[in-house]
Structures are given as structure tokens and as C-alpha cells.
């Protein structure tokens, strides 16, 4: 069965430092992968997605993610974190079929220190 | 273009009471989803719909019912609320049948006492 694991529940980085959030997936075929961000009290917003092609995907707000099939990973990165990036981040994989269902990881909460 | 809206934003129920959460989207999306979000568990799919008049069970459907009488609306019902249903509920919609971006509403925070 498909699954997504985000190993880090909580991460704290200093403003201006680089960021990497980890995501590992389990899926039998070529996965469709997503990163969403949730600001406090808000719904989820899509940061980026990978369906095929270039394994380095650019998203909004300066984020990027790299798909590594050999490691079953889709880690999210940002070279310089801003205080406004403090939020919860979710990795998700498409569940397959024609339903459009997504399977979400547990989420990683990012805290940014001034 | 409001996107995905949810009504109400907050609700407190007593055990055994019933209520309906309304999700509306104005993007002409075929696919709609109801999730619940609990701390440390990410989002879990309750029910979903692949078109008007259709519904299907997701990962955690027990205690919930849904209806999609109109393409733009997706209703989530709790017939007899339980404290275990205290959660934040999110509705989402997407356009195509394959893997596609889901657009989320702002959520409904439900407390069952």
C-alpha cells in the first residue's frame, strides 16, 4: 500500500539559514508527488508537484524539491529561510487510479528563529 | 472567484448531536474530498466524490455520511457526534481524474463535548 513518511515532526532553523525537509514514499509505480504548506489557521496551499520529467522541481516562494527514485525520496529545500516560512509542511503522494486521491505524510512543523 | 469555501468555520457539539458541514467550490471541479486533520496524523481522507451524484469511502469513513447533489457542493454529515470526531475538517477539490492539484478550503474546527 502507498504511504508517505516525514521523519521530522518539528524542525527549527534560523532566519537566513538553509532548509531541507525530508519525505519518503512507498509506491509501486511512478509516483505523483506534492508538497503543501499550511500556515496557522489556514487551509493547505500547493508549493510544488512532480509528475514526470526533470527531477528537480521549482515551486512558489523560492522552494524546490528533488525526486530521487533510488532513495524513494522527495525532499523539499529552500536556500534561505524567511520568518514567514514558519508553517506546517505536508508531503503527499497520489494514490493511483482515477480518483485523484492523495495520501499525506504526518507533517513537519517549521519554526524560524530570528 | 472564491475557490473552495467551508461553512461553518467553528462548531461545538454535544455527544449525540448531528450536524452538516458544507463545502462549495466555484471552479467547476469534478472531484471533491473531505479530510480530517488530527495532530501528528496528517490529513486522512473521509469520503470523496468523482462527480455529481457519486460518493465513495476514503480511509476513515465510519460515523460520517456525504452527499453530492450538485456539482459545486459536497456535504459532510455527522449523524450522532462522538468526542473522537473532534478535529479540523478540510474540504478540497480538483479538476481532473488523474493526479492533480487539490485546492483546499480554510477548514472547520469541530469540538464534540
Image: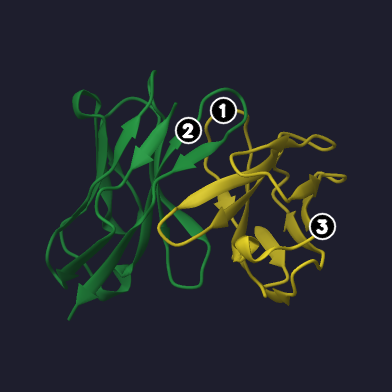
Pointers 3 and 2 within a single chain: no
Q: Pick out the residue farthest to the right.
A: B69
Query: What residue is pinned by disc 1?
Result: B98
Q: Residue at x 69, y 46 (%)?
A: B62
Pointers 2 and 1 within a single chain: no
Q: CA distance from mark 3 to mark 1?
A: 32 Å
> Residue A25 location in percent, x, y?
33, 34
What is the quadrant of residue B109 in the picture? bottom right
Give the color of chain A as drawn: green
Quadrant showing the C terminus of chain A? bottom left
Q: Residue at x 53, y 58 (%)?
A: B37
Q: As displayed, is residue A34 above or below residue B20? A: above
Callout 2: helix, strand or loop? strand
The chain ID associated with circle 3 is: B
The chain ID associated with circle 2 is: A
How busy is the neighbourhood of tag 3: few (under 14 within 10 Å), some, or many (20 plus)?
A: some
Query: What residue is pinned by disc 2?
Result: A94
Amino acid at each position: 500500500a502507498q504511504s508517505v513518511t516525514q521523519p521530522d515532526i518539528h524542525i527549527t532553523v534560523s532566519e537566513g539559514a538553509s532548509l531541507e525537509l525530508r519525505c519518503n514514499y512507498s509506491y509501486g509505480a511512478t509516483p505523483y508527488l506534492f508538497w503543501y504548506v499550511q500556515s496557522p489557521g489556514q487551509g493547505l496551499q500547493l508549493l510544488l508537484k512532480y509528475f514526470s520529467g526533470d527531477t528537480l522541481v521549482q515551486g512558489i516562494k523560492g522552494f524546490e524539491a528533488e525526486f530521487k527514485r533510488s532513495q524513494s525520496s522527495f525532499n523539499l529545500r529552500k536556500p534561505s529561510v524567511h520568518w514567514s516560512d514558519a508553517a506546517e509542511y505536508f508531503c503527499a503522494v497520489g494514490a493511483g487510479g482515477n480518483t485523484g486521491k492523495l495520501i499525506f505524510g504526518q507533517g513537519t512543523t517549521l519554526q524560524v528563529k530570528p | 472567484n472564491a475557490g473552495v469555501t467551508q461553512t461553518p468555520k467553528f462548531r461545538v457539539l454535544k455527544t449525540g448531536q448531528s450536524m452538516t458541514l458544507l463545502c462549495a467550490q466555484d471552479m467547476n471541479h469534478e472531484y471533491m474530498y473531505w479530510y480530517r486533520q488530527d495532530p501528528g496524523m496528517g490529513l486522512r481522507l473521509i469520503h470523496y466524490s468523482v462527480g455529481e451524484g457519486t460518493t465513495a469511502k476514503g480511509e476513515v469513513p465510519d460515523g460520517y455520511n456525504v452527499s453530492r447533489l450538485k456539482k459545486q457542493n459536497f456535504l459532510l454529515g455527522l449523524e450522532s457526534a462522538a468526542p473522537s470526531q473532534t478535529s479540523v475538517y478540510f474540504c478540497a477539490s480538483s479538476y481532473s481524474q488523474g493526479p492533480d492539484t487539490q485546492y483546499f478550503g480554510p477548514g472547520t474546527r469541530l469540538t464534540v463535548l
